């Protein structure tokens, strides 16, 4: 979600003072890391979060001198993975590839969460990704305006897939319906993989999702891409118009994936991880790899990422409540 200011200056300063008072072994950035690092992904393999995690893992591992092992822990709208990382030792050896929809949406979607945003320490933004409004070829619409007209004439008869209740594809499509004055029926799945299979099979007709899930199917003609939800066209889908070009200005959806550590991770370790991430994302080979997967490397430092979280939490919280969306 263009889920996007809280400052971490005070918390970093407090963490630094605690670190100074702790045993020397607790904070020796020159010695970090001395073993492999687990990078927890709150989704199954495939899709934008897994793509971002693997995009960062290899170069980060080379820079740090220790491998980053990707651990896919999908389910429960990300809450299983978030709880795991939140309760892990705050030593930098367990990290989270956090999906914006879960990070800023779940606090409004669930009455009770087994984790809190304050349990997680921002390290750096990894990627941002637009979304694609894709439909099954059986849908009688050649463009976005025709599709909206069809939805208005046939309220509730078109089903849309989501990656799960509270995901960006869920909340984003509800926002699309609100914006266009249409009614579409939600069918939630456990991740992009099973969702895309039913869209391809025609059991559901619509899916708003990030490019990695649909690019190949759009190119093969198995899906129709009506628009991308960004200000500019996507380089891997150059013939697909933006929502503004397609007649729906102002409707924009952007997902992001950020790197987070358990709260209390020593500031020197966070800074080491963050600076290494910045270097990894700036490497010449990273951009073409990212573009081939349909995502954009976009580094933000811990303070800027914290501001993004605060801004997006407020924005999407209002939308979730206004549309009575629940993850429970």
Image (spheres, rainbow, N blue to C red):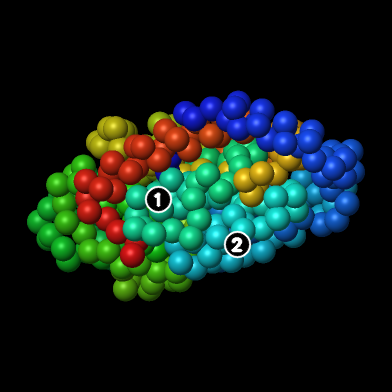
Closer to us: 67 or 194: 67
* Left or right: residue 80 compared with residue 201: right
Q: Which image quarter is the N terminus in?
A: top left
User: As displayed, is residue 221 above or below residue 254?
Assistant: below
Q: Secondary structure at mark 1?
A: helix
Q: Position of residue 26 (x, y in %)?
A: 82, 44
Residue at 61 percent across and 42 percent down: it is 121
Q: Where residue 4 sits: x, y (%)?
A: 45, 36
**Residue furthest toward the front?**
21
For residue 134, which quarter of the picture?
A: bottom left
Q: Which residue sits at x=70%, y=55%?
A: 89
Disc assigned to residue 107: 1
Q: Is residue 87 left or right of residue 255?
A: right
Give the residue pinned by disc 2: 84
Q: Quadrant of the C terminus?
A: bottom left
Which one is nearer the viewer's eye here, 171 or 242?
171
């Amino acid at each position: 979600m263009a889920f996007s200011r809280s400052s971490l200056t005070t918390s970093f300063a407090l963490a630094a003072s605690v670190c100074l008072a702790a045993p020397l072994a607790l904070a020796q950035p020159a010695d970090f890391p001395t073993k492999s690092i687990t990078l927890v992904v709150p989704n199954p393999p495939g899709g934008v979060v897994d793509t971002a995690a693997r995009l960062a893992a290899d170069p980060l591992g080379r820079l740090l001198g220790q491998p980053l092992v990707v651990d896919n822990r999908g389910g429960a709208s990300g809450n299983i993975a978030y709880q795991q990382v939140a309760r892990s030792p705050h030593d930098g050896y367990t990290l989270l590839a956090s999906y914006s929809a879960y990070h800023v949406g779940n606090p409004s979607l669930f009455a009770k969460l087994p984790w809190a945003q304050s349990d997680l320490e921002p390290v750096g933004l990894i990627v941002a990704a637009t979304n694609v409004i894709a439909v099954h070829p059986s849908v009688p619409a050649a463009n976005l305006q025709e599709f909206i007209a069809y939805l208005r004439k046939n309220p509730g008869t078109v089903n849309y897939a989501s990656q799960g209740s509270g995901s960006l594809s869920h909340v984003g499509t509800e926002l699309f319906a609100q914006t266009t004055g249409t009614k579409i029926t939600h069918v939630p799945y456990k991740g992009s993989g099973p969702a895309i299979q039913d869209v391809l099979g025609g059991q559901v007709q619509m899916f708003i999702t990030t490019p990695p899930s649909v690019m190949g199917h759009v190119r093969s003609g198995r899906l129709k891409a009506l628009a991308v939800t960004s200000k500019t066209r996507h380089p891997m889908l150059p013939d697909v118009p933006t929502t503004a070009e397609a007649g729906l200005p102002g409707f924009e959806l952007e997902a992001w994936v950020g790197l987070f550590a358990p709260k209390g991770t020593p500031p020197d370790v966070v800074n080491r991880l963050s600076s290494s991430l910045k270097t990894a994302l700036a490497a010449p080979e990273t951009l073409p790899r990212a573009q081939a997967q349909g995502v954009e490397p976009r580094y933000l430092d811990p303070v800027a990422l914290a501001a993004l979280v605060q801004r997006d939490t407020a924005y999407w919280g209002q939308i979730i409540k206004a549309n009575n969306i629940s993850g429970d």
